[in-house]
Image (spheres, rainbow, N blue to C red):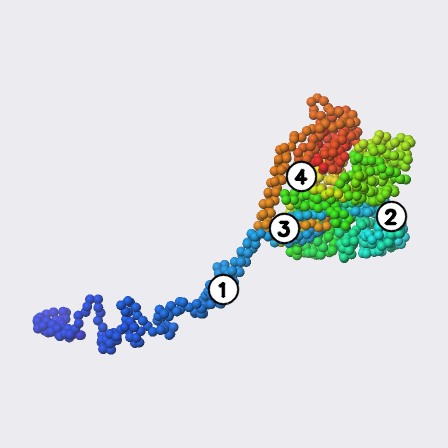
Amino acid sequence: MPGQTPNLNLYKKNPLTDGEDTFNIETMLNNNWDKLDAAVDGKVDKAAGKGLSTNDYTTEAKSKLEGATSAATPTRIILRDSAGRAKVASPAAADDIARKDTVDAHASSTSGVHGATSAATALMIVQRDSAGRAKVAAPVAADDIARKDTVDTAVQPLQADLANAAPVSISLLPGQQVVTVPRDTPLNVLNIKGRTLINLLGRSGNCESISRQSASGATIVTDTSTFTSGSASTKITLTTTAGYFYPANMIYPNLDEYYLGIGEVKTNAANIMFHFNSLGITATTQKRFDVSTTSSYKNAVQLVKITAVQTPGSSSIEPCLYITGSSNNVTNADNLRFYKVSAAEAANIMLMSSADQIAASYPYVDDVKNVNGVYIKQFGNNMLPPISQWANGRPDGQYKASSISVISPDEVQITVGSGVSSMLSTLVELLPNTTYSVSGILSSVYVYELGVYGSFVANLTSGKSFTTTSATKYVIGAYKTGAQSSPFTIKNVMLNLGSSALTYEQQNEQYVFYPDANLAASLDGSVYDELYTDSNGQARVTRRFRSMDLTGDLAWEYGDTKTGSKQVRLPVSNQIIDSERVVKYDGKIIIHVYPYSAGDQSFMTQGADNKLYLSIPGADSGWGDNYTPTADEIKAYFYGWKMGVWDNPSTAYNGSGTKAWTVRRDGWYYNQTSTLPTIPSKSVEPSTTWQNYRFQYQLAVPTDEPVRSEGAILLSGGENRIEVGCGAIVREQALYGANDTGSWFINVDHPANFMGLNSTKLKYRTKSILGVYRDRIRDYVWEIDRAGTDTYGRERLVMQGGKSPDLSAVYEVTYTALDTYQIGIAPSLISAQYAPNAREVTDGLVKASQQLMGRVSVLENGTAQAKQPQWIAPTLINGWVNYDGGTPPAGYMLDSSGYVHLRGLIKNGATAGGTILFVLPKGYRVATQLNVPIVCSAGLISQLTIDSTGVVRIGMPASGVWTSLDSVTFLLGQ
């Protein structure tokens, strides 16, 4: 059926229901068109892109729109002006529109904007201050702003390292000390001043013999079972409740002189005092330390001042030990010394607080010794040698392992029986009252004071620390209890300074050596030799004293005669009158007396008569009061020969009978000859007790000369343990021998008589072997060993495992000696310095390099210009002649490197041991006796002995068919 539209009510038909109706034009079309036309009357056409709104457009709205303006008029719509701008009132609320003037004022504000500040205030905007700076808090994170102090802290060390800086001076004293430096830097030695100690007891104080010693109320014997140096002490046994031990001779002091006596003793007696028996002398004690019952060696000390002298030159004091206790109490004495000291030294001694301090400042010396054999040592972190070099057992022989197997230098395995404990031990010198830490793979460690084994300083396990006592010498023992498994490994044992154990490292020491500086001084120290480093880096010495041996090849003259003695004289030069110091062949100190009145006196003149005058007791020379010796007979005396009557050598020769000369040995006389000797007695009898007289005097005009030095020390940043001492022996020529198992040895007493050698001992007993050199190049094939019972000293060298030395090479050994009293004393002070920053270190190294290049170029130029060495023919004696047949004749030659070579084939001479072949002149001699294997016909191995006087002789029977001198080489002066 039909219907209408909802809005205009237009008529419409339904196609489904009205489809059959007749179409009415009026109804269906015309009426609907009229309605549409009426509906659109008054409507506005819709513009393209425009929409229509149902809201009415009011007059008010129209007025507002028409009132729009670019001025800042309240309640008006903002209308941009022709320039596109519009204005508003000044803002008040935070969300008001900002005007240009507001923004400009904010932008040009210099403080306080939004709380901005130049201070380092948290959560505030950073604002520069009037100087254009602003502060922030100290940075923490890596990307924080860095402050000036942060940058300065980082940069200033770099600037300081690159700036010029004065070197830092340090003073090194004898013994050990700690030197702290800011960075790795070389140690530079500036100078060392000389010092001389004169033991007025001579060599008698070393207690190796009792020949010049005596006692009252006691008996004395030489005791080789206990000593502090050398190989013996004197054992004193009381026969009553008090006794005296007299080590040597009388001393003739003058008024107001000071004397210091020191003796090292151990005793079960009640008390020991270093004492002075006085004859016409008053000696007032200034300082004194006695020793009571003790099982270890202690120092008895007394300092006295001579306050009255009854008869100058005749009144005397006799140094001695005064012992009180009970009959049969036993005392052992060693290293006795008696020094005259200056008033200044006496004042310093009186400030010292202990006997040990005084004894360390005035060590024992044989006769007269100067600063010599000096070394400066820097210890590495590990103060112990590799475990493979440790001794089996404690030094007293206890706790020895049944076997030791060396796995590596730092590891051994020891085997012991069930329930038996064992120990490997080594000796070390440590700072007193100082903390050390020990570590390693081991069971436990015992620490003992040297010689004190009834108790221990510490017993600790790996990683623990201990503190030393006032002593300086210790035994460290790596211990294994019998309850533990066997074999037992001991490995990587380390001792370091401080309370915390460090990571293991091998012992690594650095040295500087001055082996033959021989720096002397006057008694008061006001005149002294001085070692210094010159502008080329060369060690030199300004010498104000000269030392020499008094030997038979000097220009001796006869002087005068007194009952029981003769006076001889020797021309000298550049001397200061009466400055002589003379040591007799037996170590006795010759006293200065003018005019001459008896034996063992000396004086020295200056001017027209420049001579040393020396008196010799007839008992020593064998010259009778009625006999005047010739110049050659005086020379024979200084070669070590005693004159007498044939078959009665103890009888002085007075002009009748047959003259005879003999060699001294152990109080007896040997090798009698009626031919005037012209060679040293030691060349005929090596075991003679004769030692050359020693003569030292002050120079009128100082001299300057280079001296040997070797090594360098690089101080590590932080603490460095430094030791200053004496006893350095640098590159001493060494012998070697093999045993029946094929192992080779240096520094043993009896190497199985290999190649005719009965000893490969070095000159001095070894404390520590530091290096071996083959033809001047370091040789690492030899191993340091402490296990041998035949070792001369603490250490020897071993080559084993099928290896053998180069028989054509020269081997040399650098080491420190045990018996330093035979060599010299340590300096009282060494002046040194170090560079404090990188610039100075670098500059110093560049300078040292330039100095070295300069010295090398001088050496190279000198070598290039040197003449070709020439072979010199010696004068063969005792029947020996050159072998014919085109073989080289006997000869000797000094090469440009300082080595003396022998060559040639000789025959037909006397072949007995001791036969002299020829004599080398000065400039081609060794410093100490040298024994060298030589080859003879029929495969015979003999021995050639060369001594310091130049005598070359057969040491063991040779062959007269032919004997070869080839391959005999030694370093000049070694």
In this rendering, position of residue 42 left or right of residue 900: left
Quarter where residue 902 is shown: top right
Quarter where residue 45 is shown: bottom left
From this view, report whether residue 801 is shown above or below residue 886: below
Which residue is depicted at the point 52% across and 63% down? 138
Tag 3's secondary structure?
A: strand
The answer to whether marks 3 and 1 mark residues whose Cβ atoms lie closer than 8 Å is no
As drawn, the label of residue 773 is 4
Residue identified by numbered label 3? 834
The amino acid sitting under disc 2 is Gly
Query: Dot 4 surroundings within 10 Å: few (below 14), some, or many (20 or more)?
Result: many
Residue identified by numbered label 1? 135
Pick the quarter of the image with the N terminus: bottom left
The amino acid sitting under disc 4 is Tyr
Query: Dot 2 surroundings within 10 Å: few (below 14), some, or many (20 or more)?
Result: few
Residue identified by numbered label 2? 313
